[in-house]
Amino acid sequence: MKVILLGASGMVGQGVLIECLRDPRVERVLSLGRSPSGRQDPKLSEQVHADLYDLSAVEESLRGYDACFYCLGVSSVGMNETDYTRISYDMTMAVAETLVRLNPGMTFIYVTGAGTDSSEQGRSMWARVKGRTENALLRLPFKAVYLFRPGGIQPLHGVRPKVGWIRAIYTATAPLLSFLAKHAPGAMTTSERIGQAMIDATASGGPSRILESRDINREALQGSSRP
């Protein structure tokens, strides 16, 4: 498969990129974003583009892909709903609407988070916005749309959060995260499993349109056991 990856420099995107480069089912990866991923590999190409709200200038480079793994996102801490919507909804939909037009047979996988509000009516601002985004993506005519809602994530293989204070938290809690990833699969997953589950859902189909941590872990395990 040929994959477009957004958010390759973030924690989730770093982990997904590593798995794409390791997995023989992935033939090529295009990292699309406002900055380079920082990695080099024969399977990896980069499309640096400053304005993800308007991809018209780079459309020709986005044709012929089988999947988009959308791992781009920001924390809602300190943001108002208008600004958070601009990034989490408007940008996501601008990318998705372009890609479905160019690649109607594409699988689109979007990373949200545990607690996302599909009703769009809850009290949590970020959960409402993410729920609205999920619902809009499901209405697009992709081959398939999968919504990944991980809870806690243990970063593996050198993956590190970009934001300093978040990185410090992950460093301080690393032993706990490792324990929970092994013993609380309903609440925790890893950056490795998220990448593996995305690839397997694209290659073989996911168990449902929404995958929580337990589903992500199960999908990753099933993928690793396939011949």
Image: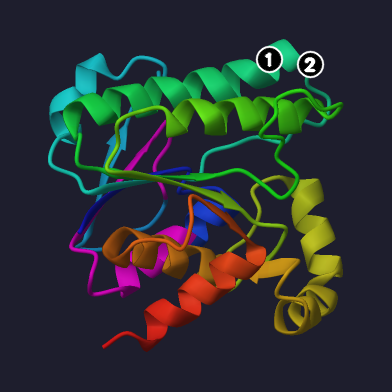
Residue 100 sits in quarter: top left
Q: Tell me the colour scheme of the image.
A: rainbow
Q: Which residue is under mark 2?
A: 80
Q: Amino acid at mark 2?
A: Asn
Which label was assigned to residue 197?
A: none
Q: Which residue is under mark 1?
A: 83
Q: In the figure, is residue 91 to the left or right of 26? A: right
The quadrant of the image that shows the C terminus is bottom left
Q: Secondary structure at mark 2?
A: loop
| Residue 211 position in % (x across, y down) | 56, 57
**Is 27 drawn above or below residue 102 in the view shown?**
below
Q: State whether residue 155 appears in this view.
A: no
Q: State whether residue 139 appears in this view.
A: yes
The answer to the question of whether label 2 and label 1 lie on touching residues, with beta carbons closer than 8 A, is yes
> Is 60 included in the stretch rendered in magenta?
no
Q: Secondary structure at mark 1?
A: helix
> Is 24 included in the stretch rendered in magenta?
yes
| Residue 79 position in % (x across, y down) | 78, 21
Q: Amino acid at mark 1?
A: Asp
Residue 168 sits in quarter: bottom right
Q: Write the start and end of the magenta stretch as one range.
A: 16-37
| Residue 185 position in % (x across, y down) | 70, 75
The span from disc 2 to disc 1 (Cα, nearest Å) is 6 Å
Q: In the figure, is residue 113 to the left or right of 45? A: right
